[in-house]
Amino acid sequence: MNCSSSGPEIRFPFRIREVQGEDCGYKGFEVSCDDRNRTILHLSEAGDFVMDTIDYVHQYFQVKDLDDCLPKRLLEDQFMSTSLPFEAPDYKSFVFANCSYVNSSMIGPESGVARLDCLSLARHMVVLVMDYDLAQPWMLWHQCYPSMISVPWSWQHPTNISESIWLSWVEPECKSCEAAKERCGLKGPKWGSEVQCIGKHGLSKAARIAMASLFALTWFTCILVFIWFVVWVLVRWGPDRIRSNTVPGSAPSNDVNGEAVEVAQRNAIRMMSISSPTIESYPKTQIDDLGQLPRPSDDVCMLGPRSQVIESLHSAQKQLEVVSLILSHR
């Protein structure tokens, strides 16, 4: 979020006071957008400044004066005493001079001074001394009264102090979050001003770990349910019953055995090709103690052609053996 397309990005610890709640920023880091779409930083008694650039990685930001007269603000004693929670990265001494002689025809790089128009009036002139040794003869000639002040200074970001300076903040410490390509934010109301790192998609590291754990737990639960189902099937149906229904050549069930016996009996009678009355008209032949039929060499009386009768009897014997084999499996 920002006040304009050319303005700095506003995110934690800063917040835009008019559109973001207090939990979106850190205490004392409130900014607002003015009617010119400039980002305005509020520094309690020191007043308002225009924020030009914010370096979230190193926790620096650049400020300018609302009226483009920053030296006037720097000369005010309350500027640095009331700039908390911000501080200067470092300090550098500069000399300002109030001169009675207003002829500025000799002002330039060769004089070692720079005129500050916003502080100069018709009867006196204020200059910023850029090179004190070079400017001494010039100041004597123009009846100047110098004064030295310490100005906030960033050696990493040298600027023209007549236009802007750099300030920094220590708390909250969000450098580690920025280094990890994450964002910084408050933990919550019960944690006060403590901060945490938050992913760019809005999830903290703890939340991402919790989601990953939940995902793993879900898969583990599915595996346990599958194992339980397999065990239940084995216990409920039994391996013998499963094998009897799946293994080729296994013994058929009792219902299947009964149907097979009836079919075999009908086939045995059909294959004999002799009707029941005809069978009754045949002479009865007594089998021996072992249940064997007479052999062709035995002296018995048979009706009809000898070969047909013997063949029919042996066919019936085979069918009875099949029936006996099926019944043995019941």
Image (spheres, rainbow, N blue to C red):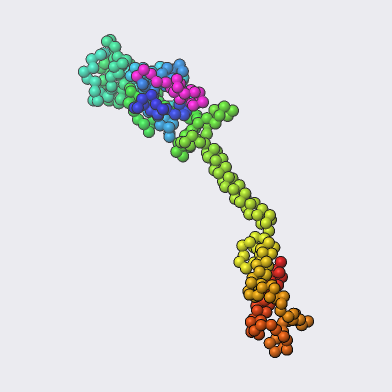
State the residue at coordinates (62%, 49%): 225
State the residue at coordinates (21%, 18%): 105
Q: Could you say which quadrant of the image residue 132 lies in? A: top left
The magenta segment is 15-36
Q: Could you say which quadrant of the image residue 207 lies in? A: top right
Residue 254 visible: yes
Q: Is residue 120 left or right of residue 28?
A: left
Image quadrant where one finds the C terminus: bottom right
State the residue at coordinates (42%, 17%): 47
Q: Position of residue 322 (x, y in %)?
A: 67, 73
Image quadrant where one finds the N terminus: top left
Per the image, is 32 magenta? yes
Q: Could you say which quadrant of the image residue 116 lies in? A: top left
Q: Position of residue 37 (x, y in %)?
A: 36, 21
Point out the residue furthest to the top here: 123
Q: Position of residue 93 (x, y in %)?
A: 38, 25
